[in-house]
């Protein structure tokens, strides 16, 4: 069913005309608009009226798709997480992980910033981001365990590398996405530096050359 006025529903004569769309398409339009709006000012400072205006729809129409601002914010985060997982994967990271992460961030910078810059600071949604962070640390630890001896420096590197990588990608976005062909190599070198710093060399041995 489309989302025109229901029978008997009062229509605001000064409200902008809203083009009829399939429900799934309208939901996507709202999620796109909400992603842009929330990425600018975060959850608390963004009102539903702002999101409705961003989507060029009425607030009444927005409520037909989402019960509340929190419901809409959660849907935006869930979609961003799914898209990121589809691009990067959710298990072992190989040499394609950083290029894939950069590609995903460049394709939807608003969603990337929303996930990693805003959502972790929102008390109502911090739990979701804590789960994502814990999963990233666990994946990093599994990948690094073959290169760094077990111990506190392995823990240090496993915690630092996901944070470093995300912050490097956000800084790259903020800098205007320079030199996209070489950006993965530049970020990979920063990650490699953490691995080398964490590796405890034994006499007569050299630190391993890590994969991203």
Image (spheres, rainbow, N blue to C red):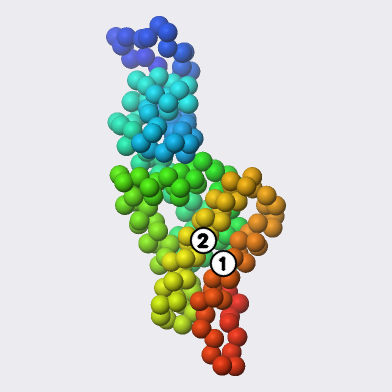
Placement of 109 over or under 99, stated as above or below: above
Q: Is residue 115 above or below residue 3?
A: below
Which class describes the residues within 10 Å of circle 1: few (<14), some (14-19), or many (20+)?
many
Q: Is there any visible trace of residue 24 in the rendered image? A: no
Inter-mark Cα distance, 1 to 2: 7 Å
- Residue 161 shows which numbered tag? none
Q: Which residue is at a point 54% across and 50% down the rendered structure image?
A: 170
Q: Are marks 1 and 2 in contact (CB under 8 Å)?
A: yes
Q: Nearer the viewer, residue 56 or 199?
A: 199
Q: Residue furthest top?
A: 13
Q: Position of residue 148 (x, y in %)?
A: 49, 79
Q: Quadrant of the C terminus?
A: bottom right
Judging from the image, what secondary structure is the residue with disc 1 in?
helix
* Residue 99 appears in the figure: yes
At x 45% / y 23%, what residue is drawn? Answer: 53
Q: Where is residue 188, by image quadrant? A: bottom right
- Relative image position of residue 125 (x, y in whole percent): 33, 46
Query: Which quadrant of the figure has residue 30?
Result: top left
Q: Is residue 181 left or right of residue 202?
A: right
Residue at the spot 33% in from the left edge and 25% down from the top edge: 64
Task: Measuring from the top left, give residue 210's x and y in whole percent.
Answer: 58, 74
Query: For the residue carrying disc 2, how many other residues have a C-alpha within 10 Å: few (<14), some (14-19), or many (20+)?
Result: some
- Residue 129 image offset from top left, x and y in percent: 37, 52
Tell which residue pokes out farthest to the bottom in this image: 204
1 or 2: tag closer to the N-terminus: 2
The residue identified by callout 2 is 164
Relative to the observer, which residue lies in front, 150 or 32? 150
SS for dot 2: helix
Q: Quadrant of residue 192?
A: bottom right
Task: Name the residue tied to disc 1.
Answer: 191
């Amino acid at each position: 069913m489309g989302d025109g006025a229901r029978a008997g529903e009062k229509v605001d004569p000064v409200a902008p005309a809203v083009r009829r769309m399939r429900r799934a398409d309208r939901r996507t339009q709202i999620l796109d608009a909400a992603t842009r709006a929330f990425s600018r000012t975060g959850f608390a400072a963004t009102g539903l009226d702002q999101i409705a205006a961003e989507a060029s729809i009425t607030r009444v129409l927005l409520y037909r798709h989402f019960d509340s601002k929190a419901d809409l914010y959660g849907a935006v985060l869930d979609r961003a997480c799914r898209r990121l997982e589809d691009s990067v994967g959710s298990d072992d990271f190989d040499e394609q992980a950083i290029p894939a992460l950069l590609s995903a961030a460049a394709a939807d910078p608003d969603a990337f910033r929303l996930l990693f810059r805003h959502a972790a600071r929102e008390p109502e949604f911090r739990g979701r981001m804590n789960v994502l962070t814990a999963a990233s640390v666990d994946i990093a630890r599994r990948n690094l365990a073959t290169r760094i001896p077990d111990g506190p420096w392995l823990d240090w590197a496993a915690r630092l590398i996901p944070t470093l990588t995300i912050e490097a990608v956000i800084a790259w976005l903020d800098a205007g996405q320079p030199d996209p062909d070489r950006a993965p190599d530049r970020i990979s070198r920063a990650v490699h530096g953490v691995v080398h710093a964490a590796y405890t060399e034994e006499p007569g041995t050299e630190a391993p050359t890590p994969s991203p």
